[in-house]
Amino acid sequence: MFTFANMNYTLTKKEATVDADEFISRYRDVERIAGYCRQCPGYGKTWSCPPFDFDPATVTDGFRSVTVTGTTIEFDEETRAACTSAQQSSATAHEAIIEISRKLLPQLYEQELQHPGSRCFTFRCVLCPEGCTRPEGKPCRHPELMRHSLESVGFDLVTMMHDLLGIDLEWSQDGSLPKHLTIVTALFKV
Ligand code: SF4
C-alpha cells in the first residue's frame, strides 16, 4: 500500500513478451490512433506527443521482441469516496499517474542498459514539473531522458492490454475516480 498526501493505493504488475512483428501487425495502426491524438487537449503540447518531425510508423521497426507491462494502480474506497467532484478525481488520478510514472522511468532506463539496442516506451513525458518547453517553441530540456508513449507512435493500447494482459483500461465516465488506472510501458528488444 502506498500513501501520497490524501490517497492510498496498491500496485500490481502484469507482463507479457511477444514477437515484435506479430505485435506490430496486430496493434499498430498509426493513422487511426493519430486521429484520436489530434482530438486530445495535449496534442502538440509536449515533445513526447505528436505531431513529430519523424515518421512514427518506423520507430518500432527492426526489433525482435516486445515486453509489455501493465502497472495497475488500485485506489482504496476511502480515496475514491473523498473525490467528490470531477476536478478532484482528475487531480488525484493525475497525481498518482505522475508519481508512479516517475518511479517506473529509472527501471526502464535500467532495462535499456541491460539490453543494448533496445528502446522503451512509457506514459507521456512527465519529466519537467515546470511544464514542457514545446508551447514556447524551445527545445526539449532532456532529450536523452524523454521517452515516447506507445499510443503516440500509433499503438492501440485498449485492444493490446485486453488481449495480452487481460486488462480492460478504465476511464471515469461520470467524474468519479476509477477504481483502477493502468500505466502501460514496453521494451522493444533486438
Ligand atoms: S523532458 Fe521536459 S521539455 Fe522534454 S518533452 Fe519532457 S516535459 Fe517536455
Image (tube, grey):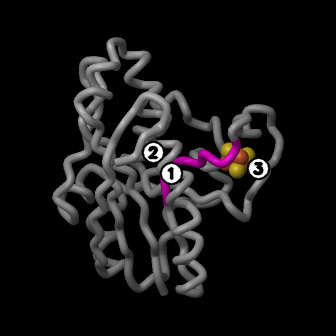
SS for dot 1: helix
Q: Is mark 2 within 8 Å of ligand 1?
A: no
Query: Disc 1 or disc 2, which is closer to the eye?
Result: 1
Neighbour tally class for label 3: few under 14, some 14-19, many 20 plus, Cα within 10 Å: some
Q: How far apart in space, not on screen, are marks 3 and 2 (Cα)?
A: 22 Å
Q: Is 167 left or right of 127, judged from the image as shown?
A: left
Q: Where is mark 3, residue-wise?
A: 140
Q: Which residue is mark 1?
A: 101
Q: Mark 2 — residue?
A: 34
Answer few, some or many: residues within 10 Å of disc 1's Cα (few below 14, many 20 plus, some between 14 and 19): many
Name the residue at 29% across, 78% down: 18
How many other residues sit within 10 Å of disc 2, few (<14), some (14-19) or many (≥20)? Answer: many
Q: Earlier in the sequence, mark 3 or mark 2?
A: 2
Q: Are marks 1 and 3 in contact (CB under 8 Å)?
A: no
Is residue 151 visible in this depiction of the protein? yes
Residue 25 image position (x, y, % from top left): 30, 69
What range of the chain is rendered magenta? 122-128
* Tag 3 and tag 2, C-beta contact below 8 Å: no
Residue 69 circle label: none
Q: Is residue 180 above or below residue 77?
A: below
Q: Amino acid at mark 1?
A: Ser
Ligand 1 under 8 Å from disc 3 Cβ:
yes
Amino acid type, mark 3 = Cys
At horizontal 69% and vertical 38% (from top left) the residue drawn is 129
The CA distance from mark 1 to mark 3 is 18 Å
Please state the horizontal and vertical placement of residue 186, each as a whole percent of the image: 42, 66
Position of residue 71 relative to residue 59, above or below, is above
Residue 7 placement (x, y as % from top left):
40, 32
Q: Nearer the viewer, residue 30 or 131?
A: 131
Between the residue at mark 1 and the residue at mark 2, the CA separation in whole angstroms equals 23 Å
Q: Are dots 1 and 2 in contact, CB under 8 Å?
A: no
Q: Nearer the viewer, residue 27 or 8?
A: 8
